[in-house]
Amino acid sequence: LRGYDAGVDAALHDKVTAERDTEFRVFLSEMRLIKDEFEIADLRHACEATVRGFEDVVRLLGTDTPTLERAIEGTFWTRARIEGNDVGYASVCAAGPHATTLHWVRNDGETRPGDLLLLDAGVESRNLYTADVTRTLPVDGRFTPVQRKVY
């Protein structure tokens, strides 16, 4: 666990051993398995804020004019910054041919009525817990019969 912060490394130089490092690594790993009430509440907050970010995006869609993928990204990012620390990872806001590109994060295209939008985004809480939600949304608010069947 060394090598991340020179100040911490210097402060612990004569106080720890490789054996204690291993013990600490195991302890931290096990701490990740069980969440306390504070952590659960923070995760719920991140999830709820993410849902609101998706709702913001849905309100942006559904017009007769194309919507820029970057506008979608910015709309979600605004929610993440208002209710959390930031987005937890680069948002995927992909429509048309971009929607089939794994981890599309350039978000430099546009969505058009009739397209499907692949939105993969998550709000990172102020305590650095992140939600991760992925949905496929019809840009104009309704799936076509073929899209509905595939969905």
Image: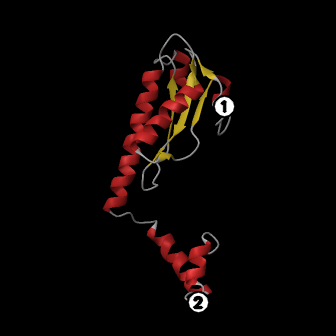
Select label 2 or label 1 by which is in front.
2
Q: Describe residue 39's horizontal placement relative to residue 11 as left or right.
A: left
**Which is nearer the eye, 88 or 136?**
88
Res. 148 visible in picture: yes
Could you say where residue 79 lies in the image, as x and y percent from the top left? 43, 37
Residue drawn where x is 58% and y is 28% of the image = 70
Q: Residues within 10 Å of mark 1 (few under 14, many from 20)?
A: few
Could you say where residue 67 lies in the image, as x and y percent from the top left? 55, 19
Please give the label number shown on residue 6: none
Q: Residues within 10 Å of mark 2 (few under 14, many from 20)?
A: few
Q: Describe residue 148's horizontal placement relative to residue 45 as left or right.
A: right
Residue drawn where x is 56% and y is 23% of the image = 116
**Which is nearer the eye, 26 or 76?**
76
- Reading the chain from its start, which is encountered first: label 2 or label 1? 2
The part of the image, by quadrant, that contains residue 20 is: bottom right
| In this view, 107 is above or below 45 | above
Report the amino acid beneath label 1: Thr
Please give the label number shown on residue 100: 1
Report the amino acid beneath label 2: Asp
Q: Which residue is label 2 attached to?
A: 14
> Helix, strand or loop at disc 2?
loop
| In this view, 119 is above or below 35 | above
Residue positioned most to the left: 37
Residue positioned most to the top: 64
C-beta proximity under 8 Å, tags 2 and 1 = no
Could you say where residue 28 lies in the image, as x and y percent from the top left? 49, 72
Could you say where residue 115 lies in the image, as x and y percent from the top left? 58, 19
